[in-house]
Image (tube, rainbow, N blue to C red):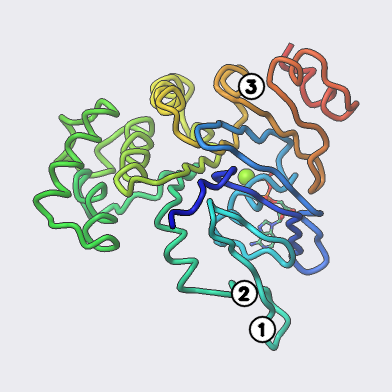
Amino acid sequence: MTEAPAPYAVHVDQVHKRFQDNHVLKGISLHARPGEVLSIIGASGSGKSTLLRCINHLVVPDQGEIHIGHEVLRSRHNRRGEAITADPKLLEKVRARLGMVFQNFNLWSHRSVIENVMEGPVHVKGIASQQARQYAHELLTKVGLEHKADAYPNELSGGQQQRVAIARALAMDPEVLLFDEPTSALDPEMVGEVLRVIRALAQEGRTMILVTHEMRFARDVSNQVFFMHNGVIEENGAPERLFTQPQSVRLQQFLSPCV
Ligand code: ADP
Ligand code: MG
């Protein structure tokens, strides 16, 4: 019998996270249907990165569940009372279905661009090198960097490095892409080239969760926008409504410099 498709690609269910006395996530829930783009906005320190990292258990929630399709990532506590992932085997399997792109690219500096893109498929998925190389070339073409295949990361601009990081995430054929402020470390003239790539992925129908300070972009590409404040989702909704008629005073204050 085949399983019915899961209604949500990602479902974050009542997630809490504390760092010592700092209660950073206070019962966060959200979900993305397949093909949806969610954006998370909010002031620095509001918990956006922690939330995104909870989705792949880079940060293990103290409470709450992460559903990726039919799979459920749960936490348990070790003897010292630290939250750890309940099922490491399951986590490994689920992580292969999630691509993550960080603010600071995190490329392997001693490997060429093409090697960076091939790394996951070859070492994690066990795909033959020849086949992985061919796919990596296709992905580099897609992000406009085929001509840089043999360059090293430090020979590239920040915008180019981030496009390589996106190609590297795509190489694993992830069901969901997570972006943590992918353009925040870039000089202004390089922001556009990275946003164009992300926009094209949204138009392909990729499921994405994006933490961003690019309000105009969030408004254009998202199905839903979530405004975080002090570890809670203070307000969420369709982008047109959220940006033009913010209900919460905090969101109004957050958005006021933009208009
Ligand atoms: P944002 O991405 O919205 O700027 P973060 O999720 O990075 O916010 O941080 C939220 C809060 O959690 C901050 O107070 C930050 O100092 C704290 N925090 C984040 N990661 C850690 C960590 N690994 N250890 C301790 N505190 C952390
Ligand atoms: Mg952050």
Marker disc for residue 84:
2
Q: Earlier in the sequence, mark 2 or mark 1?
A: 1
> How far is disc 1 from disc 3 in space, using C-alphas?
40 Å
Kindly give the residue lying farthest to the left in the view shown: 130
Going by the numbered disc 2, the residue's amino acid type is: Ile
Q: Where is residue 237 shown, x and y percent of the image? A: 74, 27
Q: Secondary structure at mark 1?
A: loop
- Say whether disc 1 or disc 3 marks the residue closer to the N-terminus: 1
Q: Are marks 2 and 1 in contact (CB under 8 Å)?
A: yes
> Which label lies toward us, 1 or 3?
1
Dot 1 crowding, Cα within 10 Å, few <14, some 14–19, many 20+: few
Q: Secondary structure at mark 3?
A: helix
Residue tagged by mark 3? 215
Q: Is residue 6 positioned above or below 146 on the image? A: below
Q: Is residue 61 left or right of residue 2?
A: right
The residue at which mark 1 appears reads as 78
Identify residue type, mark 3: Met
